[in-house]
Image: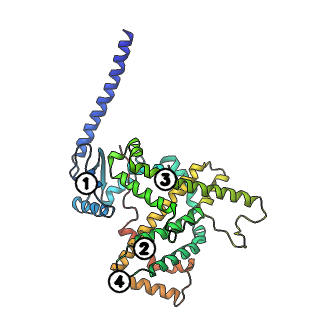
Amino acid sequence: MITFILVSFALTIIMTYLVKLVFRRIQYLRKLEKLPGPKAYPLIGDSFEMSSLKRNELMKNNAEKRDQYKSIYLQWSGPFAEIHLLRPEYAEVALKSTVNITKSMAYDFLYDWLGTGLLTSTGKKWHERRKMITPAFHFGILEDFVEIFGEKTKLLVNLLGKQEFEKEFDIYPMITNCALDIICESAMGTTVNAQEKKDSEYVKAVYEVSELILYRALRPWLYADTIWKLSSHGRAFYRNLKTLHDFTNKVIMEHREARATSKSSTQPETDDGVGRRKKRAFLDLLLDATESGHELSQADIREEVDTFMFEGHDTTAASIGWAIFLLGNNPEVQDRVVDELNDIFGDSDRRATVQDLNNMKYLEMVIKETLRLYPSVPFIGRLVL
């Protein structure tokens, strides 16, 4: 009798909870019905249409929806609703919220690679990491890497010079490889030679993992971790992910050992061995933070370095690609940029200095206008329910 009562009580609680969930879902759907958007089907939404698009068709598809719906529209990724805010005043309300600060579900697909670094974290951890990492982007530190910027960019220009300009060719992979070279040396203090070494396992893994994350994001039936891990694409993802994590872990350990050796020697840690000031990579600044009291594990350091690598190379390549596109379509602007560079360098082929970069006022305006028209990251997501 007692058992029957307990079971009945438990079932009543469960049923009450389920009824509340269903009722809340119905209310939620009724509110969403008022929003315009493309045709969606139960459970799958408009996933079949989105998953059939090629990478270069995605932005065009979103631009068409923007032109059609003007201010706001609803899109279903499987059973998950995405409300796209197209007007600045709408986006302002969402982004200024101090409650809805959790990143959208789209960021979840980055967790395996980036953990909960600055890009994917939220709340207290995000604030603490931002406060710790912001000094790493001080101009005084970035100046140390201008030489690297010049070296890798000159290599890119040389490779572009070998192209047959009578024929069309895709410049974007070349820009991406240059950005990878720069970011990797700046972030980890090591080289991957992405522009010259076509068979680099690390570079190939970066490309593969990035593509597979996008592949999964467009297919809701792969959202469940168990299904993703069992799929052929999921297995390829984790195989390449191991390559990325192994590489970063190896570099971190090498830096730890080098720092320990430096502390036990008479040579200053900031000396590169021939009396010059040693460049300090982003990784070194994280290790400094660890030694000065911040509790950062190996995994914590790796997720921030990997985040810097992912965000840095991808966004830089996108902004440079769009800038070149706009300069090509606006020859009068391109001529003014060339005139400015001629005023700075004259007939010299020397590399740019920090002062030279500061003098490129018009080019800076071109880059900022490019970012206004074509942001490197065109979407920012927040979870609201």
User: Which residue, given by chain and number where applicable, does mark 4 sit on?
Assistant: 166
| Mark closer to the chain start, 1 or 3 | 1
Mark 2 surroundings within 10 Å by alpha-carbon count, few (fewer than 14), some (14 through 19), many (20 or more): some
What is the secondary structure assignment of the residue under circle 1? helix
Checking the image for residue 49, the label placed there is: 1
User: Which residue, given by chain and number where applicable, does mark 3 sit on?
Assistant: 241
| Mark closer to the chain start, 2 or 3 | 3
The image shows residue 140 at horizontal and vertical percentages of 60, 69
- Residue 369 in view of the camera: no
Nearer the viewer's eye, disc 1 or disc 4?
4
Mark 4 surroundings within 10 Å by alpha-carbon count, few (fewer than 14), some (14 through 19), many (20 or more): few
Mark 3 surroundings within 10 Å by alpha-carbon count, few (fewer than 14), some (14 through 19), many (20 or more): some
User: Which residue, given by chain and number where applicable, does mark 2 sit on?
Assistant: 367
| Mark closer to the chain start, 2 or 4 | 4
| Mark closer to the chain start, 1 or 2 | 1
Relative to 142, 383 lies left or right: left
Nearer the viewer's eye, disc 2 or disc 4?
4
The image shows residue 54 at horizontal and vertical percentages of 31, 61
| Mark closer to the chain start, 4 or 3 | 4
- Against 204, is 154 above or below? below
Residue at horizontal 40%, vertical 69%? Answer: 371
Checking the image for residue 343, the label placed there is: none
**Residue nearest the observer in this picture, 249 or 101:** 249
- In terms of image quadrants, where is residue 323? bottom left
Q: Amino acid at mark 3?
A: Leu
- Distance, label 2 to label 3, CA atoms, is 33 Å
- Distance, label 2 to label 4, CA atoms, is 27 Å
Relative to 365, 274 lies left or right: right
Mark 1 surroundings within 10 Å by alpha-carbon count, few (fewer than 14), some (14 through 19), many (20 or more): few
- Residue 378 in view of the camera: yes
Residue at horizontal 45%, vertical 81%? Answer: 162
